[in-house]
Structures are given as structure tokens and as C-alpha cells.
Image (cartoon, rainbow, N blue to C red):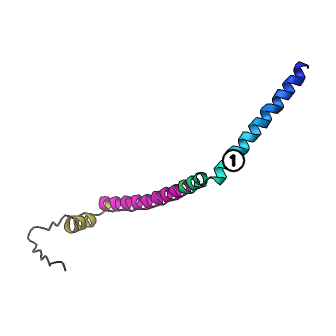
């Protein structure tokens, strides 16, 4: 037997073994419940994260607009002081109504 023929036979054997292992791997991935279930779970996680990113980007834009409004207007600062901090101007009478 020549060296070229032996190499050729060895190459065929390695290719055959690699093909068999690939078929076993692919079939175990698709036919076992764990492979497809993990894939579906990963896709759901990605979709949830993308939804969170969109929600946070919207919130971020809203907050940037609010910051810009406060920087430009004294009315916005006064509104925040009154509504969020419960402050009033000197001499004002504040009436607090009970919450229902």
C-alpha cells in the first residue's frame, strides 16, 4: 500500500466519522426538547430586553426634555417646587384638601 493511498483512506475515514458525529449532534439538538426550548427561551429574552431598551430610551428622552424645560423656564422650576416639593411663595396661603 502506498503512502498516498493510506492517506486517502485515512481522510475518508476521518470525513466519515466527522459526518456521523455532525448528524448525531444536529439530530440531538433538534429532537431533544432542551435544544429547541433553550433557543425559544433565548429569543424571548432578546425580545424582552429589546422592549426594555425601547421603554428606557423613551423615558430617557422624556427626562431630557424635562431637564431642558427646567433650564429654560422659571415656570417649570416653580411648578416642580410647588407640586413635587410642596413649597409656596412667601405670603401665600396654601389650602391642602384631604385625599379621598
Does 28 appear above or below 62? above
Find out whether residue 55 is within the magenta segment.
yes
Residue hosting label 1: 26
Q: Is residue 1 left or right of residue 10?
A: right
Give whichever of 81, 20 is nearer the camera. 20
Does 7 appear above or below 84? above
- Quadrant of the image occupied by residue 63: bottom left
Q: Which residue is drawn at 12% across and 74% down?
A: 94
Q: Residue at x 13, y 68 (%)?
A: 89
- Quadrant of the image occupied by residue 71: bottom left
Q: Is residue 28 left or right of residue 61?
A: right
Q: Residue at x 18, y 77 (%)?
A: 99
Give whichever of 50, 46 is nearer the camera. 46
Q: Residue at x 41, y 60 (%)?
A: 61
Find out whether residue 57 is within the magenta segment.
yes
Number of numbered labels in the structure image: 1
Q: Which secondary structure dominates the residues rendered in magenta?
A: helix
Does 17 appear above or below 55? above
Q: Which residue sits furthest right? A: 1
* Range of residues picked out in magenta: 42-71
Check disc 1: other Cα within 10 Å, few if <14, some if 14-19, many if 20+: few
> Under tag 1, what secondary structure?
helix
- Quadrant of the image occupied by residue 92: bottom left
Give whichever of 37, 72 is nearer the camera. 37
Please state the horizontal and vertical placement of residue 28, each as a whole percent of the image.
Answer: 66, 48
Amino acid at each position: 500500500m502506498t503512502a498516498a493511498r493510506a492517506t486517502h483512506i485515512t481522510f475518508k475515514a476521518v470525513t466519515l466519522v466527522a459526518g456521523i458525529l455532525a448528524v448525531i449532534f444536529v439530530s440531538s439538538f433538534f429532537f431533544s426538547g432542551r435544544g429547541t426550548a433553550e433557543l425559544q427561551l433565548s429569543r424571548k429574552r432578546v425580545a424582552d430586553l429589546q422592549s426594555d431598551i425601547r421603554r428606557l430610551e423613551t423615558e430617557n428622552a422624556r427626562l431630557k426634555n424635562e431637564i431642558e424645560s427646567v433650564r429654560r423656564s422659571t415656570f417649570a422650576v416653580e411648578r416642580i417646587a410647588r407640586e413635587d416639593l410642596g413649597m409656596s411663595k412667601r405670603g401665600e396661603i396654601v389650602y391642602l384638601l384631604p385625599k379621598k
